[in-house]
């Protein structure tokens, strides 16, 4: 074990109440005799992002993993668990609040605890990367496995998976995320944040006591308070107040391009405000934001009005707004009202999750509406029961837009309530508006604190630049924002890349502020145009802000929403829908065809299968005979993915096999994708990427396709990559080798050189390496031939390693498992000059010009020879053979 040095370095114990662990010497320390040496705890931790810290006592410390989505009782859920620093044994009793600006700042709950058994020595299991555990906790019971994942290139963190074993404790329907009470004190996260006393009298002093910062660390002014208010005269009240339901993360809607038109939907107004879940029990009311923060003291008369309704153990869902005379919500007016006139706030209630102690989340939307209407019959402002229509969705959306509303929400009448983003709720916007992260500002020469804010959003682990907003500020707002940004100043840009025009004179800040922005359009490069600042979003975390793109309706709903069945795009005869919800395409049956694989684009498994079928004629020549490796993401691109190169029993029969000799001896079966059915089979198993060998099975030892991957450093723009491709192609041409460009769907370009099958792997790989090294020597400020990221700053890595036996490169027309569902596309040299980024092509854009894509490499000869004389012409010494 690594000890506690890292733990100590990360914390200032004069500011945080976390235990230092410097006195306790391990599991036998004073006050801990009653505890098993092998125990575990799980702490729910609302830091920058909500996660669960899973800790095992091993050799006197708590070995720890941050489980981003929390444990699951479903064996099919492979939960990412990131190894963190070891913690002291005292931490097993810690529950409280870490000050915001300290490491791990946020609320910590003791969510579970118990003993564990393990196969073998646990310390050896951690070192070897696998632990098989039997947990006996208050919430987690039965078998679990922790297994370390193979690190990706350049990855520094240690990623593991936490997986439930198949035993009698399996319970896929149980939502552990909804369980928000401490096993030690009985308090909710909100109550712990408030410093409320323990609910359980039997809780130990250590675990029940709220952990507070020392006196030197002052609490923040925004700390929320639970509202326990008296009802106004004339209002009924059934009780003096008790225990309201716990907070539940709200259901979110998927953005689509148009409203559904069929039966089975109801339509509501889309409000522009703050989402609020109201937990009520008599006079006790707690008002939660969508992230679970208790804002009861910020919502003016709303808590008191709800207390006056006398609702017993009820959880409502709705939106806090400020509306004009026509019922149109205004986010800017809401911001002002929160500061200056809370009496103007209204609560628009549209759903009920718990009513009189009964959990209604599994009940259909229509039934929940009926129960809500009965419960809020005769309700008066500032609480309002929202109305809805059941009519033709397109017409309703048109009317809403014409009257100046934000948009509409379409909800399936037969669907349950799910605490996630769902295809059962769809949002259709009239106005282009979304949240962005503020990463900096541009100075002003006109006496203003700043000229514009620099905006971005998170995608693929990076903060992507999204343009500027320079209007929508009054003087007071300019000063307020300038003050906030001044406290977040930093020297370096938080963005992955920024255009030179925006970088000039820019001032950078830590990306913590979230701005709501209205804009006219988004350019193809992902930049907002004619943007107007609407206000700051204090209810959303900057880390959660990603690009919001409207998905095609048919991709989300599965096509025909009038009769509830899925209809293929373009009405292909090869697609068949069954009564069992399955779909058949190219003779392959798709299970769960409406599972979303690319969330931001709403691309389903069915849509991916239809794409593969449509491009099969163009794509299969690049796959025929070549061993194929798959990147499989069964739950979608945003969840866990794995690389598969060998055949297995779970693959569809249409995917072929070829037996190949291994370098270390023996033989293994590799995959072949040689038919439209095989491509559709890839979609069935969630294969979002296909990578191919440089040789074909009939002459596996004589490769026929040389690939140079031009992989730019983060600070190299795509224009430089394109020019590098042109220049390197020119050098290859001097050796008599014509090459073709492939934009990879990621950041770079592949140079592909078709060859006659005469060369063995040694000479083939030797030429590739010699070429890359030579280019690095000739232009060291521009190119590098080593994988080391430390040596690649400002340069382009010529990745020649894809030309070794068993190595692979992305297949032409393959999607990439990245946000936006980009595709690796063959392009001509003339077309390359006009392409602005390597991920410029989506599935739809490829289909729109499939003929042009399939003929892009038509002029490249496919019978070129890699000879010693040709290599010598460009200064390389190649051994033929």
Image (tube, rainbow, N blue to C red):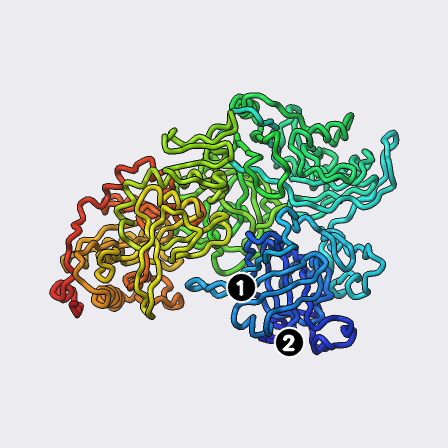
Q: Earlier in the sequence, mark 2 or mark 1?
A: 2
Which quarter of the image is occupied by the C terminus? bottom left
Of the numbered discs in the image, which one, if any, rests on residue 59?
2
Q: Nearer the viewer, residue 372 or 669?
A: 669
Q: Position of residue 53 (x, y in %)?
A: 63, 61
Image position of 135 (left or right of 698): right
Q: Under tag 1, what secondary structure?
A: strand
| Image height of 581 relative to 640, above or below | above
- In this figure, which residue is indicated by the disc labeled 1? 147
| Crowding near the residue tagged with mark 2, few <14, some 14–19, many ≥20 C-alpha atoms within 10 Å | some
Residue at x 58%, y 65% (from the top left corner): 132
Asked if residue 740 lies left or right of residue 442, the reply is left
Q: Quadrant of residue 54?
A: bottom right
Badge number at residue 480: none
Q: Quadrant of residue 206?
A: bottom right
Please tell me which residue lies in front, 555 or 680: 680
Give coordinates of residue 138: x percent, y percent.
72, 58
Could you tell me residue 390's position as x and y percent? 60, 23
Q: Is residue 880 left or right of residue 416?
A: left
In this orientation, does residue 604 appear? yes
Q: Nearer the viewer, mark 2 or mark 1?
A: 1
What distance separates the C-alpha of mark 2 from that of mark 1?
20 Å
On the question of residue 444 being in view, the answer is: no
Q: Are marks 2 and 1 in contact (CB under 8 Å)?
A: no
Observer-nearest of 486 and 103? 103
């Amino acid at each position: 074990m690594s000890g506690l040095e890292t733990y100590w370095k990360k914390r200032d114990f004069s500011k945080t109440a976390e235990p230092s662990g410097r006195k306790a010497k391990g599991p036998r320390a004073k006050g801990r005799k009653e505890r098993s040496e092998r125990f575990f705890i799980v702490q729910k931790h609302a830091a920058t992002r909500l996660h669960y810290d899973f800790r095992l006592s091993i050799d006197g410390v708590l070995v720890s993993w941050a489980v981003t989505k929390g444990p699951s009782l479903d064996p099919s859920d492979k939960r990412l668990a990131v190894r963190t620093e070891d913690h002291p044994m005292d931490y097993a009793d810690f529950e409280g609040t870490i000050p915001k600006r300290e490491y791990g700042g946020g609320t910590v709950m003791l969510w579970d605890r118990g003993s564990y058994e393990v196969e073998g020595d646990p310390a050896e299991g951690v070192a070897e990367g696998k632990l098989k555990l039997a947990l006996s906790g208050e919430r987690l019971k039965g078998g679990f496995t922790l297994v370390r994942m193979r690190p990706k290139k350049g990855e520094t963190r240690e990623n593991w998976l936490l997986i439930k074993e198949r035993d009698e404790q399996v319970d896929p329907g149980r939502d552990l995320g909804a369980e928000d009470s401490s096993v030690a004190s009985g308090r909710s996260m909100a109550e712990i944040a408030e410093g409320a006393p323990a609910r359980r009298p039997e809780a130990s002093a250590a675990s029940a006591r709220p952990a507070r910062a020392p006196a030197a660390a002052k609490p923040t002014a925004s700390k929320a308070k639970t509202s326990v208010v008296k009802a106004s005269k004339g209002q009924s009240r059934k009780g003096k107040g008790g225990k309201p339901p716990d907070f539940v993360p709200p259901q979110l809607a998927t953005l689509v391009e148009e409203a559904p038109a069929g039966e089975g939907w109801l339509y509501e107004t889309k409000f522009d405000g703050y989402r609020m879940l109201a937990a009520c029990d008599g006079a006790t009311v707690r008002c939660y934001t969508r992230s679970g923060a208790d804002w009861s003291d910020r919502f003016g008369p709303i808590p008191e009005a709800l207390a006056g309704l006398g609702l017993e153990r009820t959880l409502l869902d709705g939106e806090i707004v400020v509306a004009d005379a026509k019922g149109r919500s205004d986010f800017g007016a809401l911001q002002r009202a929160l500061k200056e006139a809370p009496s103007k706030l209204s609560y628009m209630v549209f759903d009920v999750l718990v009513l009189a102690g009964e959990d209604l989340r599994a009940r259909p939307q229509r039934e929940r509406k009926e129960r809500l209407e009965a419960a809020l019959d005769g309700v008066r402002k500032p609480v309002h029961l929202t109305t809805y229509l059941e009519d033709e969705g397109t017409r309703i959306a048109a009317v809403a837009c014409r009257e100046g509303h934000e948009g509409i929400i379409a909800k399936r009448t037969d669907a349950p309530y799910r605490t996630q983003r769902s295809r059962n709720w769809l949002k259709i916007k009239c106005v282009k508006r979304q949240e962005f992260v503020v990463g900096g500002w541009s100075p002003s020469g006109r006496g203003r604190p700043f000229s514009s804010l620099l905006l971005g959003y998170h995608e693929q682990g990076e903060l992507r630049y999204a343009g500027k907003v320079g209007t929508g500020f009054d003087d007071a707002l300019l000063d307020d924002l300038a003050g906030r940004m001044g406290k977040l100043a930093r020297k370096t840009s938080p963005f992955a890349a920024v255009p030179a025009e925006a970088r000039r004179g820019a001032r950078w800040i830590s990306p913590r502020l979230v701005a709501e922005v209205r804009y006219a359009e988004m350019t193809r490069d992902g930049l907002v145009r004619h943007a107007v600042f609407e206000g700051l979003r204090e209810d959303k975390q900057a880390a959660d802000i990603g690009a919001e793109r409207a998905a095609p309706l048919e991709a989300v709903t599965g096509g025909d929403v009038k009769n509830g069945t899925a209809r293929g795009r373009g009405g292909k005869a090869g697609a068949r829908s069954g009564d069992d919800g399955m779909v058949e395409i190219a003779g392959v049956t798709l299970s769960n065809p409406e599972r979303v694989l690319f969330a931001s684009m709403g691309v389903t498994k069915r849509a991916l299968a239809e794409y593969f079928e449509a491009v099969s004629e163009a794509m299969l020549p690049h796959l025929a005979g070549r061993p194929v490796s798959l990147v499989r993401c069964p739950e979608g691109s945003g969840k866990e993915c794995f690389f598969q190169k060998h055949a297995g029993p779970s693959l569809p029969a249409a995917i072929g096999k070829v037996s190949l000799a291994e370098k270390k001896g023996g033989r293994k079966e590799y995959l072949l994708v040689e038919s439209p059915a095989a491509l559709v089979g890839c979609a069935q198993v969630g294969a979002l990427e296909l990578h191919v060998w440089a040789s074909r099975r009939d002459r596996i030892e004589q490769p026929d396709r040389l690939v140079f991957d031009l992989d730019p450093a983060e600070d190299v723009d795509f224009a430089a990559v394109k020019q590098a491709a042109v220049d390197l192609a020119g050098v290859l041409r001097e050796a008599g080798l014509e090459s073709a460009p492939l934009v990879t769907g990621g950041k770079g370009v592949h140079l592909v050189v078709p060859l006659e099958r005469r060369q063995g792997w040694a000479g083939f790989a030797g030429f590739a390496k010699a070429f890359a090294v030579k280019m690095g020597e000739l232009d060291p400020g521009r190119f590098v031939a080593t994988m080391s990221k430390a040596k690649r700053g400002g340069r382009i890595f010529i990745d020649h390693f894809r030309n070794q036996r068993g190595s692979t490169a992305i297949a032409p027309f393959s999607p990439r498992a990245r946000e936006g569902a980009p595709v690796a596309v063959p392009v001509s040299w003339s077309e390359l000059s006009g392409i602005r980024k390597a991920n410029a092509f989506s599935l739809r854009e490829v289909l729109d010009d499939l003929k042009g894509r399939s003929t892009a490499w038509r002029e490249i000869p496919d019978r070129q020879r890699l000879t010693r004389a040709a290599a010598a012409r460009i200064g390389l010494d190649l051994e033929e053979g």
